[in-house]
Image (tube, rainbow, N blue to C red):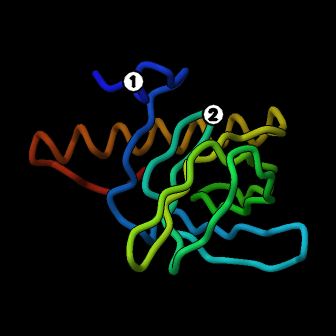
Amino acid sequence: MSADAQRRAAFRVPVPDPNWIAATLLGDDGQAAGAIVLDLSRIGLSARLSGEIELPRGTRLRCRLVLEDAPIETEVTVRHCGNTSDSTRLGMEFTALSPLHDSAISRAVFRLQRYLLRRKRGRPGLLR
């Protein structure tokens, strides 16, 4: 088990289709950037953005997520920022989730886990 996996307080589930969860990150300056959600947990997410962006650990951003049953806007804190030649991967922690949004994210994680288990067994079905 990697050191990163051991530090995590919640299981992250991969998002198999980039269209399932829409994400937008907003900086203090009002700049918005669309992101592809790579994985999701009750306490955070990992996302990929186009281009190389340097965000120091601890940077706070607004994050808009459109889940199947609820749009969410909350604050996230950058925990990891890594660049490749054409994109940036951010690991972020939710820092201001309301109980309602926490519940919506928990349901989304559950649905993703159930979908991935079905797919593994050869019966993917719908993401519901």
Q: Which residue lies furthest to the left in this view?
A: 122
First in sequence, mark 1 or 2: give its number: 1
- In the picture provided, is 61 more to the left or to the right than 36? right
122 or 30: which is nearer to us? 30
Task: Give the residue displayed 57% in from the left and 59% down from the top.
Answer: 68
11 or 93: which is nearer to us? 93
Q: Position of residue 80 (x, y in %)?
A: 57, 47
- Tags 1 and 2 touching, CB below 8 Å: no
Task: Give the residue displayed 53% in from the left and 37% down from the top.
Answer: 41
- The relative height of residue 43 versus residue 67 in the rendered view (above or below) is above
Secondary structure of residue under mark 1: helix
Residue 84: which quarter of the image? bottom left
Amino acid carrying label 2: it is Ile
Amino acid carrying label 1: it is Ala
Q: Where is residue 95 in the image (x, y as percent from the top left)?
A: 79, 38
Mark 1 = which residue?
3
- The relative height of residue 118 versus residue 1 in the rendered view (above or below) is below
- In the picture provided, is 100 more to the left or to the right than 24? right
Mark 2 = which residue?
43
Task: Give the residue displayed 66% in from the left and 40% down from the top.
Answer: 93
Secondary structure of residue under mark 2: loop
How packed mark 2 is, by other alpha carbons closer than 10 Å (few <14, some 14-19, many 20 or more), is some
107 or 125: which is nearer to us? 107
